[in-house]
Image (cartoon, rainbow, N blue to C red):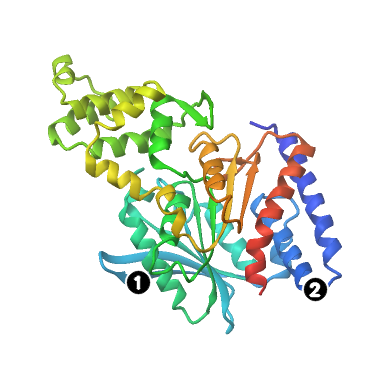
C-alpha cells in the first residue's frame, strides 16, 4: 500500500504530465488533436489525478436505468450520455463475475468519463454473475440482445458501436462479438483483463501456476478467482448428493466424514482434487473426468473457440501482476490474432486487476499512464468521428 505522500506524488506527477499533453493540443483544431484532448482528459479522470479538468470542458452526462425485453425475460442496464439531439458513438460494457455494482464509485466515474469523451455508454447488468460470483453462459446471448437494444436507440450512430468488458466480462464480450447476429455491426471490442481459454484458466487455478509457451511459474490465485472456480466445478457435478458434500466441505467449511469423501464417484474425486490443488499435468488429466456438459460449456465461453469469427478491431489490455486472471491469457489471445492484424495489445502495471492502483515509482507511473493514453486513443477516436 502506498503511503499518503507517495500516493499524492504519483497523482501529481501523472496529473502534471497529462496536463502538458492537454496544453499542447488545446491550441490545435485538427481531429487528431481533439481526440488527443479527450483521451488526455479521460486518462486523468479514470486515474483519479488531482488535476482532472474533464468536467470543466465537457457537458454533464445523464444516467438512465433501462429495461428491455429479451427471450428469457427482461434485461437491465445503465446508460450514460450527454443529452442532446445528436447521434453518438456507443459502447456496451460488461463487468463480469462478482462485478462492482451499479453505484460503485469507479463504475460511475468510468461511465461519466466515457460519456464525456463522446460515447453513449451502456453497462449490462447480470444478477447471476454480478452478485453470485458465478459464470452464466446465458449472458453471452444476453449481451447480444443488449447490443441490439443499444444499437436501436435514436441517439446512437449505428456505424460506431462497440463492446467492452472487464475480467470475465471481457471474455464474454469477445464471444458475443463473434455472434453472427451482431458481428458485422461491432466496430471494436476492448478486452481488459480477460481470459483466452477458460479451460487453461481452470488448469492454472487448480495448479496454482501460470504457463506460457514453455515457461511455467507459481501463481498466487486470488480468493475471488478460486471462489468462482469452485462454484463452477460444484455446479457442474452431475450428482446432487456429491455437490452437497463438496459444497459443505469447500464452501461452507464444515467437517465431512472421511467415508463420504472416499465414496465419491470418479467425477466427484476429480472435482475434489482440483479444488484441493494439484500439478498442471494432473489437472489436465482430471479435467477429462468432468462431465461432458461442463466441458462443453467451458469451450463455449472461451474466446479461443470463437476468435476466427471476430470481425471487429480488437483492443486488449491486461495488468502484468494480475492475481485474478493471469496476464498470459491475454498474451495468448494477442498471439492468436497475430495473423489477422487490426488489434492493439497493451500490458500495464498501474491497475489492481482492473481498478486503478499501483506501487510503481513516479517515472514508471508516468510511462504506464502514457501506455493507457496510447491504448485509449483509438477508442476515443471512434467517438470523435
* Residue 244 versus residue 306 in the image, above or below: above
At x 65%, y 41%, the residue is 350
Q: Which residue is mark 1?
A: 68
Left of 52 or right of it: where is 225? left
Q: Nearer the viewer, residue 331 or 12?
A: 331
Residue at the far top: name it.
258
Where is mark 2, residue-wise? Answer: 30
Residue 112 figure quarter = bottom right
Q: Position of residue 370 (x, y in %)?
A: 74, 49
Residue 259 is left or right of residue 212, and the answer is left
Percent of width and height locating residue 9: 77, 39
Residue 145 in the image, given as x and y percentages of width and height:
36, 68
First in sequence, mark 1 or 2: give its number: 2
Q: Secondary structure at mark 2?
A: loop
Residue at image x 26%, y 68%?
A: 71
**Of marks 1 and 2, the one in the foreground:** 2
Rendered view: 135 above or below 271: below
Q: Identify which residue is drawn at 42% across, 69% down.
A: 182
Seen from this angle, which residue lies furthest front? 339
Amino acid at each position: 500500500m502506498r503511503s499518503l505522500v507517495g500516493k499524492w506524488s504519483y497523482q501529481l506527477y501523472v496529473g502534471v504530465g497529462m496536463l502538458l499533453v492537454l496544453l499542447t493540443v488545446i491550441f490545435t483544431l485538427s481531429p487528431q488533436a481533439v481526440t488527443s484532448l479527450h483521451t488526455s482528459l479521460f486518462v486523468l479522470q479514470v486515474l483519479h489525478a488531482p488535476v482532472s479538468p474533464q468536467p470543466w470542458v465537457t457537458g454533464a452526462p445523464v444516467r438512465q436505468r433501462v429495461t428491455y425485453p429479451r427471450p428469457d425475460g427482461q434485461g437491465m442496464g445503465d446508460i450514460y450520455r450527454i443529452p442532446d439531439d445528436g447521434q453518438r458513438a456507443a459502447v456496451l460494457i460488461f463487468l463480469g463475475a462478482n462485478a462492482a455494482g451499479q453505484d460503485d464509485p469507479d463504475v460511475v466515474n468510468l461511465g461519466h468519463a466515457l460519456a464525456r469523451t463522446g460515447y453513449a455508454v451502456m453497462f449490462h447488468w447480470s444478477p447471476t454473475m454480478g452478485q453470485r460470483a458465478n459464470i452464466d453462459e446465458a449472458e453471452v446471448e444476453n449481451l447480444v440482445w443488449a447490443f441490439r437494444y443499444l444499437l436501436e436507440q435514436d441517439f446512437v450512430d449505428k456505424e460506431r458501436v462497440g463492446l467492452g468488458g472487464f475480467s470475465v466480462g471481457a471474455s464474454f464480450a469477445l464471444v458475443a462479438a463473434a455472434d453472427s447476429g451482431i458481428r458485422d455491426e461491432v466496430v471494436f471490442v476492448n478486452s481488459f483483463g480477460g481470459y483466452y481459454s477458460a479451460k487453461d484458466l481452470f488448469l492454472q487455478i487448480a495448479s496454482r501456476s501460470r504457463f506460457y509457451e514453455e515457461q511455467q511459474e507459481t501463481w498466487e490465485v486470488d480468493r475471488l478467482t478460486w471462489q468462482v472456480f469452485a462454484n463452477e466445478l460444484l455446479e457442474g457435478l452431475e450428482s446432487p448428493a456429491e455437490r452437497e458434500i463438496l459444497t459443505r466441505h469447500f464452501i461452507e467449511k464444515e467437517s465431512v466424514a472421511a467415508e463420504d469423501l472416499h465414496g465419491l464417484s470418479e467425477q466427484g474425486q476429480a472435482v475434489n482434487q482440483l479444488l484441493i490443488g494439484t500439478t498442471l499435468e494432473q489437472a489436465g488429466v482430471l479435467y477429462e473426468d468432468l462431465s461432458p456438459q461442463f466441458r462443453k460449456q467451458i469451450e463455449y465461453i472461451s474466446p479461443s473457440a470463437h476468435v476466427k469469427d471476430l470481425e471487429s478491431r480488437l483492443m486488449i489490455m491486461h495488468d502484468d501482476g494480475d492475481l485474478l486472471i493471469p496476464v498470459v491469457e491475454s498474451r495468448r489471445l494477442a498471439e492468436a490474432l497475430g495473423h489477422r492484424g487490426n488489434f492493439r495489445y497493451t500490458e500495464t502495471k498501474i491497475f489492481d486487476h482492473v481498478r486503478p492502483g499501483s506501487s510503481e515509482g513516479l517515472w514508471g507511473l508516468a510511462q504506464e499512464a502514457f501506455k493507457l493514453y496510447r491504448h485509449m486513443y483509438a477508442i476515443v477516436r471512434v467517438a470523435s468521428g
